[in-house]
Image (spheres, rainbow, N blue to C red):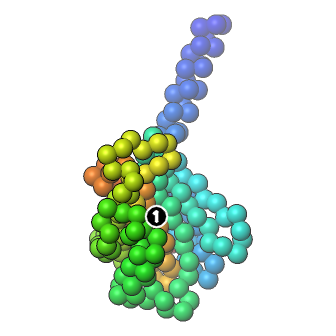
Amino acid sequence: MKRLMFVLLLLSVATVRADDSAAKQTSVNVPDGATMDITAPAGWSLETTQPDPKAPATTELKSPKEEADLQISFIADKDGDFSTKDKLIENVERVAKAQFVDSSVEKAVRVQTLESANGTCVYAEFTVADLVGKDAKPGEYKVTATGLMKFGDTIAIFTLLGPALDDKAYADAKDVLKSGIVVHK
């Protein structure tokens, strides 16, 4: 009997671990916009919160060791403020200058395009000057990307945090932006 209990215990632990390592998916209903499906890589956590019903919901994806953190909020573009790639770039430049340039190594905004079949995506990346040459403490990130992605009349506003621009978890989060966010069909 003890042996059977031990085997059952091992099987339950293996089942929990298998479930934790599977890709996770959620759907976010955007008021006056589309419903968006988000798929997290296997092993990543995925949580959507909306503390204020008047504010957009935020979906947060964290890598297994929490070295990368991707936060995404969606809004409807009712007024066309984000209707073109040029408008997306203007908005990224404005926000990035206000929030990241002064504390960055780069000291300038360089907007980049992330190729995706799902939508138009523009972003800027920054290295946190205060953390260069230092070990980041838990919850601190050495690099930040901020950007916008257009899916028809729905806009994703995202922040990506990570340990380095060439880190695998950081690249995996970019892959979520490329192919892991789609308009629900």
The quadrant in which residue 13 appears is top right
Residue at (59%, 8%) from the top-left corner? 3
Query: In the image shown, does 12 or 21 lie closer to the viewer?
Result: 21
Query: In the image shown, does 180 or 52 lie closer to the viewer?
Result: 52
Q: Is residue 77 left or right of residue 164?
A: right
Query: In the image shown, does 50 or 117 lie closer to the viewer?
Result: 50
Residue at (49%, 91%) from the top-left corner? 80
Residue 62, above or below 10: below
Residue at (49%, 42%) from the top-left corner? 138
Which residue, given by chain and number where applicable, does mark 1 sit on? 159
Q: Decide: few, some or many residues near mark 1? Use Cα within 10 Å; few <14, some 14-19, many ≥20.
A: some
Q: Is residue 98 left or right of residue 46?
A: left
Q: Is residue 166 left or right of residue 16?
A: left
User: What amino acid is at disc 1?
Assistant: Thr
Give the x, y percent position of residue 9: 60, 20
Query: In the image shown, does 133 or 44 lie closer to the viewer?
Result: 133
* Residue 181 in view of the camera: no
Residue 24, above or below 153: above
Give the x, y percent position of residue 132: 33, 50
- Indicate the quadrant containing the N terminus: top left, top right, bottom left or bottom right: top right
Residue 36, above or below 160: below
Element type at mark 1: strand
* Residue 71 in view of the camera: yes
Residue at (36%, 63%) from the top-left corner? 104
Give the x, y percent position of residue 123: 36, 71
